[in-house]
Image: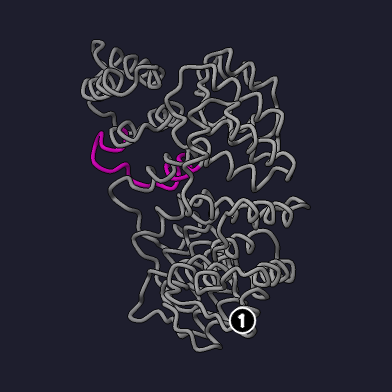
Amino acid sequence: MCKVLRARGCLWGDSLSAAAKAGHRHVCEWMLASGCRLDMYIVCSAALGGREDLMQWLLTELQGRPNDHVYDLCRLLLLAAAKNLSLAALQRLWQQLMAGRHGSELQQQLEQLGERDRGAILAAAAGSTTADWQAKVEWLEGLGYPRTARACESALWAGDGDAAVARLQWLRGRGYPLEAAVANAAVSVGNLAALRFLVEQAGVRPTGVQVPVTEAARQGHLAVLQYLHAGGLRVNTRSVAEMAARAGHLPLVVWAVEGLGVAPADGAAWLLDCAAESGNLELMTWLHVRGWALGPRAIPNGAESGCEEALEWLVERGCPFPLDGGAYLEAAFNGDLAMLRCLHRLGCPWGPPGELLADCIRNEIPVAVLQCLLDLGCPEPDWDAAVKLVEGWEAQMDPQGRHTALLAWLGEQRRRWRSPGAQGA
């Protein structure tokens, strides 16, 4: 399949990184032999996937290739290894780096790691899901890596509920500080058990919580937000409602409206506009019945959601179409051809003549999307200007021909446009 896609002009993207993380050495070998570039992030992807043998092979390959992007490789490798490799594999890598087995530059990077970087590496071990995570923490402590609150934050990502609490208790017993940032992290990940432990047993409360509260709302962590509210912590109710609506979390929106008093004053539309982005018809209906209006962002947001039923629901209730073609642009960004056709079927305006396709070209929207718009009757742009724009990219920023397919398609449209009678057709 990879060979077929490449033969059709598909770009490499993150495919080599994905293959490395999944441990597919034969795919990695083919990609490298076919010209895909190897860099330090690919090597780290293998470590993040727990693939020690592949990591070692890629690291050797990297050392044998011209590459100036290894300035941060040692730190990134150790972060990935501490998180997802075993203690034995981490020790082997560290010893190889210290002995200069992978080059003097990486050896020097290891020797020059600062306190902040070393603390981050230990924190990665504290958040590791490998069975020997505690042994990794102890070994790194023995090397003099510092005990920081960041390790406690990292531990919150490694397990839910009581598992995270157990990690925090273990780390606390070894002298790791529990600070407000740790409580903030518990809010962000929605770990109520850890948050209760921090507040009620460790005496640590979250502070400056706007960012973690917003993240908790985005993830739908209702119990955590209710706990904070019951504890007297003030939250931005509008931000909570907005983020919950965008993510389609009906129970959280219900709480924001009924429990926090978020109301549709003067026919406000902002919350239903946000809900349209989720495509959650039940949520949209619940808000509409309670007096929330349909605003100017509802249809573009509905197009972004990819839910045709949500878009039809909006149109049936008289929601106004944007006149600038913005709804099409949202669908185009997602490569959603079905949504483009749905918008056209429902009568959404194209916007100013030629502007929509010109915007898509400027934003490097894939050719398949451009062709779909053209087939639907989207007004054509100035093809000469479009070709000139992309030729400029090709000359200045794209020596490897990343825009070759787009340029070929634009050239074809320009030739058709210039043909006798085409512009008047």
SS state under label 1 = loop
Q: Residue pushed farthest right? A: 131
Amino acid at dot 1: Ala
Give the side of residue 348 with respect to residue 323, left or right.
right
Q: Quick one: 190 or 333, which is closer to the camera? A: 190
Q: Position of residue 316 (x, y in %)?
A: 47, 60
Residue 424 quadrant: top left
Q: Position of residue 373 (x, y in %)?
A: 40, 32
Residue at point 38% right, 21% down? 403
Q: Quick one: 104 or 78, which is closer to the camera? A: 104
**Residue 281 visible from this viewpoint:** no
Q: Quick one: 417 or 365, which is closer to the camera? A: 365
* The magenta segment: 339-357
Residue at point 47% right, 57% down? 277
Q: Position of residue 260 (x, y in %)?
A: 48, 84
Q: Which quarter of the image is occupied by the C terminus?
A: top left
Q: Which residue is mark 1?
A: 202
Question: Neighbour class for label 1 at 10 Å: few (<14), some, many (≥20)?
Answer: some
Residue 216 quadrant: bottom right
Residue at point 41% right, 55% down? 299
Q: Which quarter of the image is occupied by the N terminus?
A: top right
